[in-house]
Image (cartoon, helix red, strand yellow):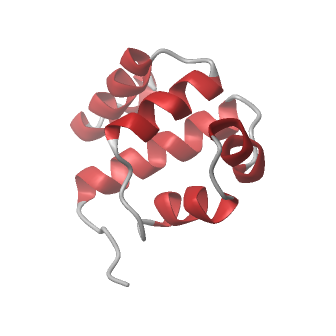
Amino acid sequence: MKKIQRSDYKALRTCLKEMRKQNGFTQIQLAEAIGADQSDISKIERGERRLDVVELVHICRALGIATETFIAALEAHLSGDKHHV
């Protein structure tokens, strides 16, 4: 399977993983919270599976963060300003 290697997708994966950990979730816990398998979360974080917008909304809800907060963190990563994450 071809990995999603573009820098913008890498930023998305980095934000997801950082926010998951900051909010005290393991991949298993997050997967259970959104009704997915741990392997789905792992594949998204490794760039082997794309994340769709509906999944992103469910993930944000499970993590207790606003989708807008996630998008702002992603924009900060994309602009190279990781201090606002």
Residue that appears at 44% across and 26% down: 83
Q: How many labels does the image show?
A: 0
Q: Is residue 39 toward the left or the right of residue 48 in the image?
A: right
Residue that appears at 56% across and 46% down: 17
Q: In which quarter of the image is residue 70?
A: top left
User: Against 62, is 15 above or below?
Assistant: below
Q: Quadrant of residue 20?
A: top right
Q: Position of residue 6 (x, y in %)?
A: 23, 63
Residue that appears at 37% across and 45% down: 12
User: Against 65, is 40 above or below?
Assistant: below
Q: Where is residue 79 in the image (x, y as percent from the top left)?
A: 22, 35
Q: Quadrant of residue 82?
A: top left
Q: Where is residue 21 in the image (x, y as percent from the top left)?
A: 68, 39
Residue located farthest toward the bottom when viewing the structure as drawn: 1
Quadrant (top left, top right, bottom left, bottom right) of the N terminus: bottom left
Residue that appears at 56% across and 22% down: 61
Q: Is residue 70 toward the left or the right of residue 7 in the image?
A: right
Q: Where is residue 27 in the image (x, y as percent from the top left)?
A: 70, 51
User: Against 15, is 75 above or below?
Assistant: above
